[in-house]
Image (tube, rainbow, N blue to C red):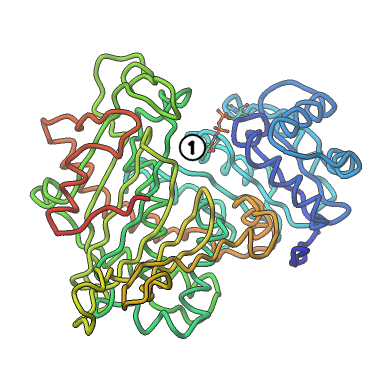
Amino acid sequence: MPAQLTDVPSFDLVVFGGTGDLAHRKLLPALYYRELGNQIPTDARIIAVSRRNISSEEYRNWALNALNDHLDEIDDDIMARFLERVQYVSVDVSANTGWENLETALAGREDVVRAFYLSVSPDLFGTICSAIGSHGLITDKTRVTIEKPIGKNGTSAHELNETIGSVFKEEQIFRIDHYLGKETVQNLMALRFANAMFEPLWNSTHIDHVQITVAETLGVESRAGYYDTAGALRDMVQNHLLQLLCLVAMEPPESMHADSVRDEKLKVLKALKPMDASGVARNTVRGQYRAGASAGGAVSGYLQELGKDHSNTETFVAAKLEIANWRWGSVPFYLRTGKRLANRISEIVIQFRDLPHSIFPEDAGTIKANQLVIRLQPDEGVKMKVMIKDPSSSNMRLREVSLDMSFAATFNVRNPDAYERLLMDMIRGNQTLFMRRDEVEAAWAWIDPILKHWGNDREPPKGYTSGTWGPSASIALIERDGRTWHEE
Ligand code: NAD
């Protein structure tokens, strides 16, 4: 089935950090696929910027190698068309040199969308935004996209937002959380708000609890230096997991308009019950992986990868959250994320309540409560677990089956990467899947006390063997409530 595409206006996309890892692995492949999908207007341009002193020709060769590394299949004609629109400009942002090269490259194109993508270290976000402003590069159709992390805590996020906000208006700022661009995450909204049958059940009367798991099998590897200054709570929970939680828990927005959706997400973040020291001790678990086995091979522990004897940085977090509002009072949300876990899985599990009464005889078997499992990766799709009569039994025996909606198989389309969608939305000026300033700051307001109490805690993160599901305390966190983590 051919993809239905929304028109995109012509643009100049300026990628700061055009020679970096994100550009290599995500941005260039995403843009190539949009070229392949004929979504990029004829005269649109991609201008890669970094401090390296290379020509556009050399950059195009580098880009071609990057694309060869990351694409399964390449169409030579499309690739030639794509590379033709790519050029390179050298600007050293720290030394404040080369901006005139960018001014020249952009001159005379004030009528097309001018999109700046900051795929550089966050330390440079403020400097770049200020320089874009002072060099007069902001037009009526300008937007700026910033990557995570947005701050290290509430204060630094606020400062960064102030700096960027002094140059750009909020409607020009696109704070990316690539989880929001995932097909299944958008499907969560379709499932909730395009079907009449879920929303009446979407509350504490019918839902027992919600689980959100984002598990990786990889360790920190070459990112150890950065990771050690962040940890799983900042790197994953503050943004991706809380954003997923918001989409599960928010009230129906008035429309898909960016501010309608973001207003509702903000209300959820504001309703998260803050944790004091004893709440943090009781409701959070932090862990750090040790040596073990992953994907069949022996792997080192975090400290070995980091090359240090000691670090209190967590590579695993589990937490039990409460949303203090009418819809979700008494429904715990269990979140967990970590590196070097048993499987690479991201999923949301909506666990419905047990039946109030069973009419079936005891030998019919156990009646399991319904579950809705929304799988973000690796195989995006939704499963609804329901009880049926076992067709192989002549008696009334009950069995749980999965109504399996695997999107890629159903529609026979390539599953687009989140960056494809988000880049095109940004060019079109659609902020629905991007985080607003107040959302980011509200998320930090909930995270900050946890960071503070962990900082005061003399106990280091709990060790867990690579290739397992994290520290045993994470299992205890949910099992003490008579529940178990969904694992299959
Ligand atoms: P990287 O270190 O691989 O690339 C950084 C880029 O910035 C390079 O192109 C480099 O030349 C350029 N640069 C550095 N100093 C410069 C200067 N003074 N002037 C001009 N250019 C300069 O980083 P990355 O992994 O690509 O990450 C980029 C951003 O994306 C960061 O904010 C990171 O947190 C975020 N991010 C990255 C990933 C990922 O998978 N790589 C995932 C999520 C978010």
Please report the residue visible at 85 percent of the width from the left and 50 percent of the height from the top. 108
Please report the residue visible at 53 percent of the width from the left and 52 percent of the height from the top. 379
Badge 1 marks a residue whose secondary structure is helix
Q: What type is the residue that disc 1 sits on?
A: Pro
Please report the residue visible at 32 percent of the width from the left and 21 percent of the height from the top. 291
Residue reaching furthest front?
394
Is 108 placed left or right of 358 in the picture?
Answer: right
**Which is more toward the observer, 180 or 448?**
180
Is 219 placed left or right of 424 in the picture?
Answer: left
**Which is more toward the observer, 75 or 31?**
75
Residue reaching furthest left?
278
Q: Is residue 71 above or below residue 477?
A: above
Q: Position of residue 299 (x, y in %)?
A: 39, 21
Instruction: Tell which quarter ligand 1 is in.
Output: top right
Q: Is residue 179 above or below residue 192?
A: above
On the image, numbered disc 1 is attached to which residue?
A: 122
Which picture quadrant has residue 310?
Answer: top left
Q: Position of residue 263 (x, y in %)?
A: 42, 72
Q: Position of residue 232 (x, y in %)?
A: 34, 39
Count of number-bearing discs: 1
Cβ of disc 1 within 8 Å of ligand 1?
yes
